[in-house]
Structure formats: structure tokens, C-alpha cells
Image (cartoon, rainbow, N blue to C red):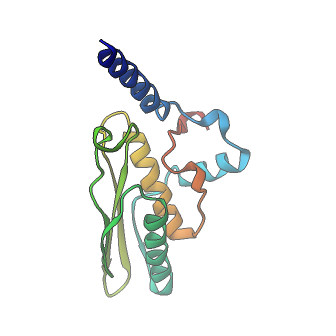
Amino acid sequence: MRILMYTAILLIVSVFLGCANMTPTNSMLTPDDVTYLKEIENQSTYFSLEGDVADEAWSRAGFFVSNYSDMKIQNMSDFLIETYNPISPEQIGVYPRYGYKITRLKTKVSNEFTVNVSCSVNGWYDSIIIHNAKMLAYYMKTGIIRPHLISQRIDYSKL
């Protein structure tokens, strides 16, 4: 009976902690955060850059993934940065994990970049997946990042 009760309590706490990430963090945003989020709101996760700017962007992508991804880097080359697939919360804890895949295609004229983010849990976290991808793409292009906003649920309609 005690084991059943402990299991029930653990399940309730796990669900509660897992849902904590589902509440938008808009009420905790500073004016600088709001300005930053408005800038990344329309950021495409597919973009082109030329010359040294493209090399800087690729370096930033590697930095972002190695420092802010929940998953370790699986592949890193001149054209691909990819983490391991995110592990489900049931395997490692109560919150979702995010993985990244960034590709770079060098053409004669420019470098084309594509940023993809995946999550160990689908559905509820789709807006965070898009948010993280836009943050990474914006960081690659500008070098500007606000790390405390990574993996946060933002209600862009209320900015």
C-alpha cells in the first residue's frame, strides 16, 4: 500500500513539474526581453548569408548548440551540426529535452542555412520548438542572444 501511495505522489509531482513549462512566461519579461522577442518573432529558420558573415554564423551555431542544447552533439562538420535525438521525459526526468539540427549548403553565391529543433514530447511544446529555432537563427545572423529565454513558452500575441 505504501508503495502505491509513493508512486501516486511521485506521479502527481512529475505531472505538476512537467506542466510548469507550459505556462507562458510573458509576465516575467523585461522591456529588453520584449524588444528582443519582437525582433525574432518573424525570423525565418531558413536564411542565406555571404562570405565571412556566413562563417561567423556557423561558428555561433556550434556555440549555441554546445552550450544551450539539452542533448550532446552527435555530428559536427562544415555542413551539419546535429545533436542526438531528444530522450523522452519518462527515461530521464520530468521535463522535455530539445535537440537541434542545423545544415549549411555552400553555393557559389552564398551559404544557405536551415535550423530545425525537435522535442522529446510533441504537441504541448510545439511553440517552444519554434521559439528555440527562431532564437538560434537570429543568434546565428546577429550574434545577439538572451539565454534565459531559451526553452521558454512565450505568448507572442501578447507582446
Seen in the image, is 53 located left or right of residue 71?
right
Task: Work out which quarter of the rendered image holds the N terminus and state it.
Answer: top left
Q: Residue furthest right?
A: 31
Seen in the image, is 95 located left or right of residue 24?
left
Q: Residue furthest top?
A: 1
Return the x and y of residue 52 as percentages of the image width and height. 49, 86
Residue at 71% over, 44% down: 30
Task: Write down the quadrant of residue 45 in the picture.
Answer: bottom left
Relative height, residue 87 to residue 104 (above, below): above
Residue at 40% over, 19% down: 9
Relative height, residue 107 to residue 48 (above, below): below
Return the x and y of residue 79 as percentages of the image width and height. 30, 78
Q: Residue furthest front?
A: 2
Q: 18 or 147, which is in the foreground?
A: 18
Residue at 31% over, 83% down: 107
Q: 13 or 81, which is in the foreground?
A: 13
Return the x and y of residue 86 as percentages of the image width and height. 30, 51
Q: How many marks?
A: 0
Q: 35 or 25, which is in the foreground?
A: 25
Task: Work out which quarter of the rendered image holds the C terminus and state it.
Answer: top right
Seen in the image, is 33 located left or right of residue 130?
right
Return the x and y of residue 80 as percentages of the image width and height. 30, 73
Q: 111 or 131, which is in the foreground?
A: 131
Seen in the image, is 93 located left or right of residue 149?
left
